[in-house]
Amino acid sequence: MTRALPVLTVLAAIILVWYLAAIGMNAQWAQDQAARAGTTLTTGQLIADTLSQDRPVLPAPHQVAAGLWDGIFGQAITSKRSLVYHAGVTLSATMAGFAIGSLAGILLAVGIVHDRTMDQSVMPWAVASQTVPILAIAPMVIVVLASIGVTGLLPKAVISAWLSFFPVLVGMVAGLRQPDAMQLDLMRSWNASRSQSFWRLRLPSSMPYLFASLKVAVAAALVGTIVGELPAGATSGLGARLLSGSYYGQTVQIWSALFMAAALAAGLVVLIGLIERITLKRMGLAR
Amino acid sequence: MSALPILAVWLGAWGLNAFLARLNTRLTRILVPLIFGTTLLLLWEMIVRAYAVPSVILPAPSQIWAAFMANIPLLWGDFVQTILKGALSGWLIGALAAIATAIAIDRSPFLQRGLLPIGNFVAALPIIGIAPILVMWFGFDWQSKAAVVVVMVFFPILVNMVAGLAATDALQRDLMATWSAGYWQSLVKMRLPAAMPFLFNGLKITTTLALIGAIVAEFFGSPTRGMGFRISTAVGQLDLPLVWAEILVAAIAGSLFYGIVSLIESRVTFWHPSQRR
């Protein structure tokens, strides 16, 4: 409870600032409309107008909430106007990419930890690959894969896999190297084979690191999917909603898609946190 | 048939690397990744030539390099527009704002408790989604890209800086108190220096975020230059070598940006254990 009050206070302050900003930023348009109609607005009318425009510069919180409600519960789930449908499209590509990316990251980390040649050759380039703003390639990946006949879920999954691969790789390398010389010597004194000391010592002790990086990776995978949906052609998914909203000036649509994406990201991170808690508790590693 | 030389090059380079890696001297530690990278480029070139992969799907490194050399003025213009104007100015503004906010909320434990969970939460969100909104607000030119970058880098730096300001222990703070140092004195002479390793951690994380933000924001509207603009139009014209040349620029810029920040870090935090050799 000592944390709930400050967080709620800050949230309330944010919503208050948001309302004030919405009034300020939408006032210009409202006054222009009134001047064109030859009327003047009282302060009350002005505020009421700024908070209920169709295409506001900044939609008020309750408009976004209404947009979200309509998008989630107001439509059939299969409808193209349903946010649940678009979130589902995005989520499936995210999960596919996340699975591919984290599996690749784990496998590469196992190789790096066990083979010095791989460590010295691959690791510097894995680090260097992250200085490339990979999202910039997203449109190209989509177009290239489409030109060889691969469309739909896979191109987006490739991008999110690339983004989620690196955090997992780094975390797993650190995690698999976590056992110190004493523990490794103990395994050796028990005459444990390499695979035995991997399965019974290295892998279990890397779990906290793995989960910490999975949380980062799943958020990154979602960003990758959304950016992958931006290039022309994608008509479904939250990224496509953002883009079409920005083309047609539908600000409420942009904000609802944005909040849906945020909720999705938060949900995924919480879910992994939950799996982490259960796993670590069963392994006796819970703090 | 054409697979044989490719396999031979790959196995040969791998064997050489395996041999060098066993020596494990300072020279081989530099040589091994270099050989690995060169091998990748070589294999890429050989595969593209041997199987006649159309440049629409994957241009060869030599084609990319040719496109790079042929378009240097164009690429330089895009670099200035996107990296220098959009990413760098946004990154600086965002970092300064985050540092100032961190110092401001440092005095209020109540605000810290309220803001930090929200900051951590926001840092994990797909913030890139605000790009269309900010492009609408700030126009198509670089100002909107800088605004996207400001929002993207703000929270990671804030969270790191707040952790950094809390990094001094009670003993150190008591020592400052026994010297009757005031708030500002202990802030400038003890806590800001102590926060530097944390701050630079945040700054380094956000270098790539800044580039990504500036480039992706251009997909939502941009003037007729900029790296994101060039990538999306060149993809439309299937001019893939030019796209890859832009990616090469982005990679070089990203590495340089990261390298410069790391260099400043090693100068500023020379006293920190992580900088010891």
Image (cartoon, coloured by chain):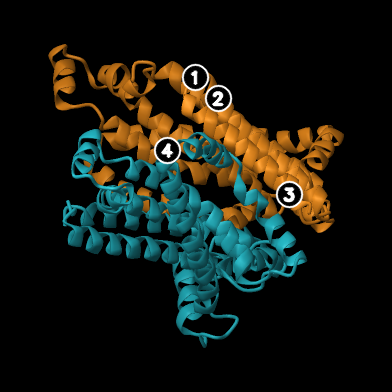
Chain colours: A cyan, B orange
Residue at the farthest top position: B179
Q: What element carries label 2?
A: helix
Residue marked by disc 3 = B4
Q: Which amino acid does label 2 sit on?
A: Ile
Mark closer to the observer (4, 2): 2
Q: How crowded is the residue under tag 3: few (<14 C-alpha within 10 Å), some, or many (20+)?
A: few
Residue at the (78%, 51%) spot, across then down: B2
Residue annotated with mark 2: B30
Q: In which quarter of the image is the N terminus of chain B?
A: bottom right
Residue at the farthest bottom position: A76
**Is label 3 or label 4 in front?**
3
Considering only order in the chain, which callout, 3 or 2, is on the residue closer to the N terminus?
Answer: 3
Q: Is mark 4 on a helix, strand or loop?
A: helix
Instruction: Kindly tell me whether residue A225 is visible in this rendering.
Output: yes
Left or right position of B35 against A82: right
| Residue, disc 4 | B157
Looking at the rendered image, the disc whose residue lies closer to the viewer, 3 or 1, is: 3
The residue located at (18%, 20%) in the rendering is B172
B97 or A119, nearer to the observer: A119
Q: Residue at x 83, y 55 (%)?
A: B54
Q: Disc 2 and disc 3: Cα gap in Å?
A: 29 Å
Residue type at the position of mark 4: Ile
Instruction: Give the residue pinned by disc 1.
Output: B26
Marks 4 and 2, how far apart at CA: 32 Å
